[in-house]
Image: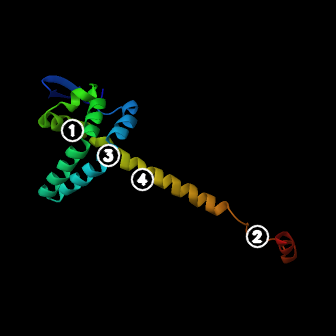
Amino acid sequence: MPPTRSITFRGEQVEVTPLTLAQIGPFIKATRPIIGRVIVAASLVSAGATIEVAALMMDVLEQDADAFAKGGAIVAGKPEAWVGGASLADAAALAEAVVELNEDFFGQRLPSLMRAAGKAIDAVGVTQAQSVGPTLSTSSSPEVTSAEMS
């Protein structure tokens, strides 16, 4: 059973779960306008740049609150307008729950999977590179080899 987190959102208890395979595509599509800036903000927090983070997040909220509401609706299983009417404190609680519940996948498993895929692709590339092109032979006579090349 996957972990869950119960939060109070607009006065109701909402059970937040990790994103499912069915939710991930719509969630990424909905939040695409803000994903990059949120990642930048998270890295700035790690560097201690609180003023810059606040400015960046104010831009996100001003310009793309609808993307946040769409993504929140997907994870909360509630209508977008209902999520969009939430207080900033409730929106922060929902975002925190989503990040916490999906941190293992995006922070550890996905990078590990990408590294493994990269190694597999490199291995296939090396194998293909070795099998492409003329095969060198030391047992053919120069006459036969030059006739094959013509």
- Do the numbered discs 3 and 2 sit on residues whose CB atoms are within 8 Å? no
Label 3: state its secondary structure: helix
Nearer-N-terminus badge (2/1): 1
> Where's residue 11, x and y in %?
12, 24
In the image, which is nearer the foreground, mark 3 or mark 4?
3
Q: CA distance from mark 3 to mark 2?
A: 57 Å
Mark carried by residue 35: none
Residues at circles 3 and 4 in contact by the CB criterion of under 8 Å: no
Dot 1 or dot 3: first in sequence order is 3
Q: CA distance from mark 2 to mark 1?
A: 63 Å
Amino acid of disc 1 = Ala
**25 or 32, nearer to the observer:** 32
Instruction: Report, in whole angstroms, how far the alpha carbon at label 1 lies from the one at label 4.
Output: 28 Å
Amino acid residing under circle 4: Arg
Dot 2: few (<14), some (14–19), or many (≥20) neighbours within 10 Å? few
**Could you tell me how far apart the alpha carbons at marks 1 and 3 are, in whole angstroms?**
15 Å
Disc 3/disc 4 C-alpha distance (Å)? 26 Å
Q: Which tag, 3 or 4, sits closer to the chain's start? A: 3
Q: Nearer the viewer, mark 2 or mark 1?
A: 1
Could you say which is closer to the camera, residue 5 or residue 141?
5
Marks 4,2: beta carbons within 8 A: no
User: Which residue type carries mark 2?
Assistant: Ser
Element marked by disc 2: loop
Query: Which circle marks residue 115 in the picture?
Result: 4
> Mark 4, mark 2: which one is toward the viewer?
4
Instruction: Give the mark toward the camera: 1 or 3.
Output: 3
Q: What residue did someone put label 3 on?
A: 33
Q: Is residue 59 above or below residue 145?
A: above
Residue 1: x, y in percent? 30, 26
- Residue assigned mark 2: 137
C-alpha distance separating marks 4 and 2: 37 Å
Residue 55, x across and y down, in percent: 16, 53
